[in-house]
Image (spheres, helix red, strand yellow):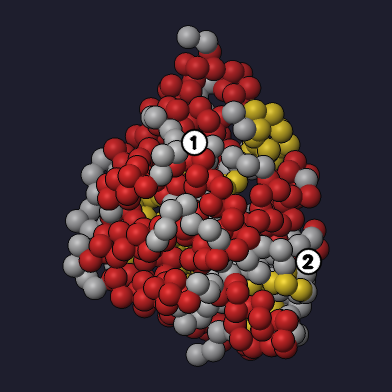
Amino acid sequence: MGVAQRAITALAEQYAARFRETLRPMRMIGREAEFPIVYPDGRAGDVLQLWKPLLARGGFAPRYDDPDARTLIVALTGPDGTVEVEVGRATVELVLGPYEDLWQLAEGSSRLLLHVVEAVHQMGMRVLGFGIQPRSRASRALMTPKRRYGYLAQAVGRAWWHFTATAADQVHVDISRAELVDAVNTLNLLSAPLIALTANSSVYAGRPGRYLSGREGLLGALGEGRAGMTPGPFLSVEDFVRHICRYPCYVLRRDGGFRRYNRPFEEYLQAHGPDINAYLWHEHYTWNSARPRAHNSTLEIRPACQQPHGEPLVVAALALGWMEARAEVQAFLQDALPDPWATMRRYRRAAILHGLRAEEPVKRFVEGVLHIAEGGLRRRGRGEESFLGPLWERLEQRTTPGDRAREVVRSQGVGALVDHTSYQF
């Protein structure tokens, strides 16, 4: 066994040990909800302008990108969660949970979002239930001036700018150590129907775009495998860690600073051994549709766009339902699809373009996996299956929020889309 392989084996053991052995009585759920901030005409706003009105409310504590100099606030932490500025300075992120159920998550989301919406309106801007900046192009000018982002932009290249305009609804669901590999495989496969049901980033750079899920379509520039669906199933935690180590590590974090690296992480292991903290930093800059998060023992489900204001928890409901019903999902996929990975990869590409109008792998496929999610939620015994209601309506009409956004812009313009998608309380 070579030096790198021994390091990967040791790294996988350290990594797995960070996940909890057993679940809590209820599988917990959290959310990283991103929202575009715009001016009424659709131009990109500025999250950094929100810190002053939010701090004036009391109850928030600032976090700085540069803790010593304290020149750039990047987040405020309050009793209901954290308000952060994302890669794009016109994207605000709400970090929520963990909560025991979707009802608690809905209440916490509403309380924190109310503070944000009121502060945004106070500054003459709007919060959108949409998955991308509708008018301003992704660019260096939109990037938040965090120290690490400058290094990452240099290392990644132009593909990095896509992060400055997009807004996801990312869900974190509790997993145990024994579930890790199975959860990663299953939820990556299900990224295709998730995108089909939730595509909501169809207008960007001021006009209807090629993709209904512009967020996923444009982030494909990062390279297939590193972003989006994984290339195939993993057989073990070590298999997963080995896969992540093959990708270039863009930037190293060193002594409070950063350094471009841009070489496969395997090379770093060869020289430095199984450095778990360096691995976790590297892994954070891979963007698969379902990725394990060791710091809180969750699976992060990433590919959904931010949703319309009247339907805020459909992504969380779908992800939680599928996680609770993974055995049923796997049996369904095995019965329905002779080659699940190749088939779902094709369907995923079609879903990014066409949403629920994409040709399904087999007849009533989306209906089948939606029923499975509903059953998983129902077994939790808290009535959370009601949160899936809007998805059943979308499926019946074969229409996503992205379809409606295109229609609004084509008939009335970007200003009307801002009105259509703005949060009001």
Q: Are marks 2 and 1 in contact (CB under 8 Å)?
A: no
Question: Which secondary structure, mark 1?
Answer: loop
Q: Residue furthest top?
A: 1
* Residue 201 falls in image quadrant: bottom right
Residue 61, position as x, y percentages in the image: 51, 69
Image location (x, y in percent) of residue 102: 33, 70
| Amino acid type, residue under disc 2 in the picture | Arg
Which residue occupies 66% across, 69% down?
Answer: 202
Please tell me which residue is depicted at 50% across the width and 72% down the height of the picture.
398
Q: Residues within 10 Å of mark 1 (few under 14, many from 20)?
A: some
- Residue holding disc 1: 232
* Mark found first going from the N terminus, 2 or 1: 2
Number of the label disc, if any, that sits on residue 276? none
In this figure, which residue is indicated by the disc labeled 2? Answer: 137
**Marks 2/1: CA–CA distance:** 33 Å
Residue 96 or 369: which is nearer the viewer? 369
The spot of residue 379 in percent (x, y) is: 20, 62
Above or below, comparing residue 196 to residue 296 in the picture: below
Position of 85 with respect to 273 (left or right) is right
Vertical position of residue 270 compared to residue 172: above or below: above
Does residue 50 appear anywhere in the picture?
no
User: Residue 284 occupies which quadrant of the picture?
Assistant: top right
Q: Amino acid at mark 1?
A: Gly
Q: Residue at x 40, y 61 (%)?
A: 364
Up/down of 85 relative to 260, above or below = below
Q: Secondary structure at mark 2?
A: loop
Looking at the image, residue 285 lies above or below residue 13: below
Task: Compare residues 126 and 355 and report the one nearer the observer.
Answer: 355
User: At 74% from the left edge and 55% from the top edge, which residue is drawn?
Assistant: 161
Residue 423 showing in the rendered view: yes
